[in-house]
Amino acid sequence: MKYIIFCSLLVVGLILTQCDKDFIPNFEISSPAEGATIYIGDTVTITIDVDHYKSIERIDLYIDTFRVEILCCEQYYYKWVTGDCSACFGYYAEPGEHTITAHAFDKDGTVFSDEITINVESKPLIPYVRTKSATVISTKSAIFYGFFQNYSKPVNQFGFFWSKSDSDPGEKNDVILVNAKGIDFKVNADNLEANTTYYYKAFAEIDDSILTGSVASFKTKEKIDVEITDGNFTDSRDNKNYRVVEIGKQTWMAENLAYLPVINHPEEATITSRPVYLVYDYFGICTDSAKASDNYQSYGVLYNWHAAIDACPAGWHLPTHNDWDELRTFISEKEGMDKLRTGNFIKAETGWGQDGNGNDKYGFSAVPGGAYLNEFMGKGVFAFWWASDLMSPEYPAFHRWFMFNDTNFSCQNEDQYQCLSARCIKD
């Protein structure tokens, strides 16, 4: 009887041993689900479910044909940061269909596999409008800035709501529309009141909806009476005297600005974050000797944009794009000609090369002071002056120019670190 029981137990043991050897564990990729949609930039947890995990030595995980991880020690999951190549060991999934494959290896070398297919898409953009701080604030004008995050649908209109009495301006208040195509948009708000607080808000119209940014505010400068005697103005900062001329409704300095608080070396003109002051062909470090040079006496100072924007004395400001345009529009209407061809009427009668002198009919007395455009160039040949307007907060500013050998008077944009002449216009 004992022999029969022993034999029976032996047979059962052999059967169980054989069953354990032939056991196939439950092995599958449990997440993400088959056919799931994943957006670039998301962090996706890839999870492997294993029943008989003690027999598994390692799991190789692949995205398409790229092995991204070796899983072991019963930790069968992996966090895939889809938009960060450094986090996925160099693998970045482009939009489209991709496969996730897992291969498990047990102690006997047997391989178990599972594979799913997923879809990777670019994350839908959420429309977003931001109001940026106003810049170039004078007694009567300021530049409003807005930012729009790109969106799949076309924008019907950009603009700004603004008010001097409503701290949360909207459609019921004044509106300035902006013709813009990029993500940054701006407008020069004119005819403001001095020493007054204004509120404004950027907006974008999409379909029938209007998206707005937060409210920003600023205060225009206080108007200061400028003392002009016999057509001359004295800058109290350095007692420099300037001739002044009235052209239409504007009052201009009839000389290039020569305010020079410090002299920089031309190599510093590559700096974009702080003011730079140069004198044509001067490479020294002494402000007094720079002021004694013939080029300073004839052409004034060359400023980068950061220096020019605050260089004009109180009661004056660096001209806006609209200020410059008003000047040439006035002359063009008086002379009955295209405003782009009005340069001859504001060019000085002497100093321009190759018979490029003007008749200076309006007394502006433009002189060819050249510029520093990575090197000193153009003295006696052309004139460049800054305008205060930035194309955008991150993009180059405007400048005005015309060449010696024609009557052209037009505008271009220029890098903020280049150094140009400046003229001031009365507030």
Image: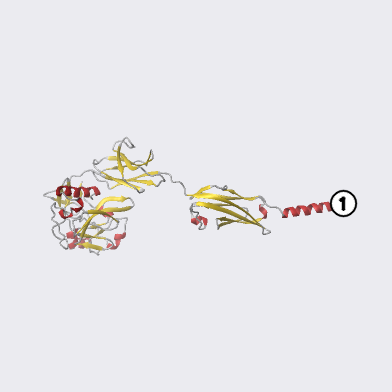
Residue 9 visible in the displayed image = yes
Specify whether 142 is left or right of 125. Answer: left
Rendered location of residue 406, percent (x, y): 19, 58
Q: Residue at x 75, y 54 (%)?
A: 18
Q: Quadrant of residue 142?
A: top left
Rendered location of residue 267, percent (x, y): 29, 63
Residue under pointer 1: 2
Residue 314 visible in the displayed image = no
Q: How many marks?
A: 1
Crowd class of label 1 (few under 14; some 14 to 19; many from 20; radius 10 Å): few
Q: Height in image: 424 above or below 280?
A: above
Q: Residue at x 22, y 62 (%)?
A: 378
Q: Residue at x 12, y 50 (%)?
A: 231
Query: What is the residue that sits farthest to the right in this orientation?
Result: 1
User: Looking at this view, is 234 or 204 the one in front?
Assistant: 204
Query: What is the residue that sits farthest to the left in this orientation?
Result: 230
Question: What amino acid type is highlighted by mark number 1?
Answer: Lys
Query: What is the image's colouring?
Result: secondary structure
User: Looking at this view, is 322 or 410 the one in front?
Assistant: 410
Rendered location of residue 369, percent (x, y): 20, 59
Query: What is the residue that sits farthest to the top in this orientation?
Result: 172
User: Looking at this view, is 99 or 70 the one in front?
Assistant: 99
Element assignment for label 1: helix
Specify whether 190 is left or right of 97. Answer: left
Rendered location of residue 244, percent (x, y): 15, 51
